[in-house]
Amino acid sequence: MPPPASSTYTRYETRRRDPNPRAAALLVIDVQGRFASLAAPAMPAIATTVALCRSAGIPIIYTRHVDPVPPSRPLAEWWAGDDRIAAGTPAAELLPGAGRAAGDLVVEKSTYSAFAAGTGLEETLRGMGVEEVIVCGVMTNLCCETTARDAFVRGFRVFFSADATATASRDLHEATLVNMAYGFAYIVDCDRLEAAFGKGK
């Protein structure tokens, strides 16, 4: 599903703000083999977002989903059989083309939120002095949205990408943008990030 054009998401905005490169980290959520077809339309924007953030000195953190053995409930009730992601399989491997570089941290998770117990993500961000997160990746309405909400309730300022996220349908994608803009996150895209980061040069 292609991400919506900028004119689509800007009508949902309730507030506008630029990320602060000195206080932000980019979270690239689950751009991995299992979601390759869903991520494909957004891959150019994901790569561009990563490149823009890297050039601005923003740390990049990747997540990947791996299902535990035995399966955890209630997630296993929704995603069973072929939908499960086993460690060490192509489904669990990060996709090439997402801009990952040597030294980029990879956080492994087993549920929707990258902040779930055991990931250490919050502690890592606090230790880096991060106060803001920029969220991109897949799926817009599941792992990206849940991670963004979790970041918000943990006290991080959240920026949510409209063009560097993707999911199974436009309706699901836009529903998340509506919810994020209403009370959780500032909506951004590649053009907005490029303009924001260019201000400090």
Image (cartoon, rainbow, N blue to C red):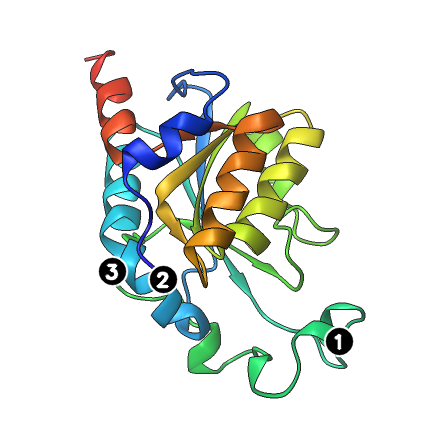
Q: Are marks 3 and 1 in contact (CB under 8 Å)?
A: no
Above or below: residue 124 compared with residue 34 = above
Quarter of the picture containing the N terminus is bottom left
Residue 47 x %, y %: 26, 49
Is residue 150 or residue 70 the one in the foreground?
150
Residue at point 63%, 47% (across, down): 146
Q: Residue 77: which disc?
A: 1
Is residue 115 or residue 125 the one in the foreground?
115
Above or below: residue 179 compared with residue 94 = above
Tell me how many marks there are. 3
**Left or right: residue 194 compared with residue 114:** left
Above or below: residue 129 compared with residue 89 = above
Q: Which sits earlier in the primary sequence, circle 3 or circle 1? A: 1
Mark 2 residue crowding within 10 angstroms, few (<14) / some (14–19) / many (20+): many
Q: Which sits earlier in the primary sequence, circle 1 or circle 2? A: 2
Query: What is the CA distance from the residue labelled 1 to the residue labelled 2?
Result: 24 Å
Query: What is the CA distance from the residue labelled 2 to the residue labelled 3?
Result: 11 Å
Identity of the residue furthest to the top in this view: 200
Mark 1 residue crowding within 10 angstroms, few (<14) / some (14–19) / many (20+): few
Query: What is the CA distance from the residue labelled 3 to the residue labelled 1?
Result: 32 Å
Q: Amino acid at mark 1?
A: Glu
Judging by the rendered image, the residue that carries numbered circle 3 is 97
Judging by the rendered image, the residue that carries numbered circle 2 is 39
Residue at point 42%, 80% (across, down): 90
Q: Which sits earlier in the primary sequence, circle 2 or circle 3? A: 2
**Residue 123 visible in the picture:** no
Quarter of the picture containing the C terminus is top left
